[in-house]
Image: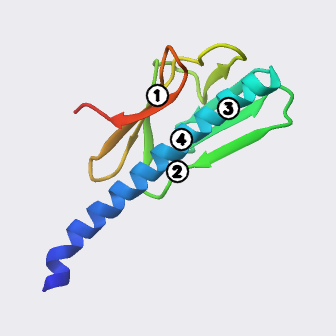
Amino acid sequence: MIMAISFPSITAGLDGVRLQGSARRAAALLNSARARADREQMPVEIRVDLDRNRLSAVSADGQWERALDLAEGVRIVAVLPPSEEKPRRFVALPGVPGPRLQLQLDTPRGRSLRVSLDPLTGAPQVEESPK
């Protein structure tokens, strides 16, 4: 009986942990792409593939590449600014803060986080999505 009562709470907690972890890893990948562009003085393309639920980055010379498949149950549901392009592509240029980019990550239970790049500093931020 205790398991029956506590199970929904446990699964909701696991969803939150997966969502937070995925958001932090997405922010780290964006930060890594920006840092790579600055360090190598070379553009880095950031790709957001909604169909494959994947975030990736690759340098212009193809020598550096990183990819992130999100945790089970976490989906990229929106990319801003909106576009019909698939997969979405952004470019991190050396010496500038970074592309205007915002991802919304959701879980099946309705929890949502937003990962964005600060327009002034280019630093990635993770915050609760407004309902």
Quadrant location of residue 63?
A: top right
Q: Check residue 116 in the rendering and tell me which mark sits there, or answer none.
A: 1
Disc 2 designates what residue?
70
Q: Earlier in the sequence, mark 1 or mark 2?
A: 2
The local secondary structure at tag 2 comes to: loop
Disc 3 designates what residue?
33
Amino acid bearing label 3 = Ala
Q: Earlier in the sequence, mark 3 or mark 1?
A: 3
The local secondary structure at tag 4 comes to: helix
| Residue 86 screen position, x and y as percent | 59, 28
| Residue 6 screen position, x and y as percent | 18, 74
Is 18 displayed left or right of 97 in the figure? left
Q: Earlier in the sequence, mark 4 or mark 2?
A: 4
- Above-or-below relation of 2 to 66: below
| Residue 65 screen position, x and y as percent | 76, 40
- Nearer the camera: disc 1 or disc 2: 1
Tell me how far mark 3 sits from mark 1, CA to CA.
14 Å
Q: Earlier in the sequence, mark 3 or mark 2?
A: 3
Tell me how far mark 4 sits from mark 1, CA to CA.
9 Å
Q: Check residue 26 in the rendering and tell me which mark sits there, or answer none.
A: 4
The local secondary structure at tag 1 comes to: strand
Residue 53 visible, this orientation: no
Is 10 displayed left or right of 30 in the figure? left
- Looking at the rendered image, the quarter that the C terminus falls into is top left
Is 23 displayed left or right of 28 in the figure? left
Q: Earlier in the sequence, mark 4 or mark 1?
A: 4
Tell me how far mark 1 sits from mark 2, CA to CA.
16 Å
Query: Do the residues under discs 4 and 2 have CB atoms within 8 angstroms?
Result: yes
Residue 102 visible, this orientation: yes
Tell me how far mark 3 sits from mark 2, CA to CA.
17 Å
Query: Do the residues under discs 3 and 2 have CB atoms within 8 angstroms?
Result: no
